Amino acid sequence: MSEVRWVFHQLAQAVRSRPAVALLGARQVGKTTLAHELGIQSDMGKEFVYLDLESPEDLAKLQDPLQFFRLHADKLVILDEIQRLPEVFAVLRGVIDANRRQGLSTSQFLLLGSASMDLLRQSSESLAGRIRYIEMTGFNVLEVANKDDGGAALRSLWLKGGFPEVFLLDDELESFALRQDLIRTYLERDIPQFGLKIPAMILQRLWTMLAHLQGDVHNQSELANNLSLNRVQLNHYVAALEDLLLLRRLEPWHVNTKKRLVKSPRFYVRDSGLLHTLLGIKSYNALLSNPILGKSWEGFVVENIFSVKPSFVNAFYYRTSAGAEIDLVLQLDGNEIWAIEIKFGLSPKISRGFHQACEDVQATRKYVVYGGTESYPTSYNTTVISLREMMLEIDKLHNKP
């Protein structure tokens, strides 16, 4: 397993070049550990000071934030769980602007948050043009697996998910129990701390229903009726899971075409381990015999691709009412379009609908990500590729001129 998290160098570069950086990710994905590693290994010639804004003792130190920041003007200030103190953003703006006037271009603030970029931006508009956002996921395939391990690490990551403490447990049942505890923590503590008045039982039922609908377009009215909610409440609760970085929304691709397109978003439970826990899947053998297998693999692939995807690459899915479909469409700069089909089987069969959909979106590259470890070309200029190799191809885009 890699000793350095995948986003470390991206984060270090951002901290060297921007006055403030926000590292965002779900709870327990390793943000705090990574931030301390960055502070210790920093080549900026600065010490660092760390405050956990969930700690009353640390929170008290920011009763006069301007004075605190002035006291530590020569240090990298790391503020953890920044969404707990949104009013500090206005103070940060003044400090950053003062540093700029004095010719101090090095970053001084690293902000860690367990909320989505959209939610955090609502509180940080005053930092527009001064802050860079980086999202951190749990472990991805490139961090835990290599070509020579026969796929064992990938299978373990897929079953248990990417939360470091959960993944590093060898025992599948212990990992399952820890994930159950993590789900309860989200429902009973984290949701209320965000000021969201949502009954934990209803949110768990919704989360579980969305797990059963992994990667599918759900019927909002039917889902709301099953939970005794109206559609406004349903959308509010779904948005809460998105804001906590627990649910991913994948929007449909819209093209200028006369074909009837599916225009509703798809949703994925982002961590595969939490997905399996919500569905009661405790072992890899149980996963292999569960009807969710294909959609679980699809969500796992999507989330791993998002973990390395550059921010300038936009992602969608494509489906017509006639059934032509692409699981993931990546839109690069210019006219470059990558079409990615996702199949778990070791001998993936590619449907005519995929090739037709590729013509619709004018795909410049076509891939099928499958459950094997080798990569090879097939008909219609399509490449069957392992998840690891697909991620490496996408990561190369970071260096694209």
Image (cartoon, helix red, strand yellow):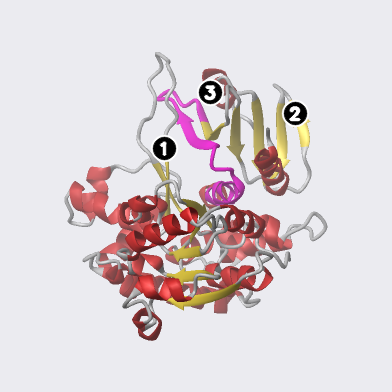
> Is the residue 291 above or below the residue 45 in the image?
above
Q: Nearer the viewer, mark 2 or mark 1?
A: 1
Query: Does the magenta portion include 321?
Result: yes
Whether label 3 touches label 2, CB < 8 Å:
no
Query: Does the magenta portion include 374?
Result: no
What residue is shown with label 2?
Answer: 378
Q: Amino acid at mark 1?
A: Glu
What residue is shown with label 3?
Answer: 357
The numbered disc on residue 366 is none
Which stretch did the figure color magenta? 299-325
Q: Secondary structure at mark 2?
A: strand
Q: Nearer the viewer, residue 355 or 245?
A: 245
Q: CA distance from mark 2 to mark 1?
A: 29 Å
Q: Amino acid at mark 3?
A: Ala
- Asked whether residue 164 appears in the rendered view, the answer is no
Q: Residue at x 50, y 70 (%)?
A: 73
What residue is shown with label 1?
Answer: 251
Q: Position of residue 172 (x, y in %)?
A: 60, 74
Which corner quadrant of the image does residue 9 belong to?
bottom right
Badge 1: how crowded within 10 Å, few (<14), some, or many (20+)?
some
> Is the residue 306 above or below the residue 22 in the image?
above
Q: Position of residue 213 (x, y in %)?
A: 40, 49
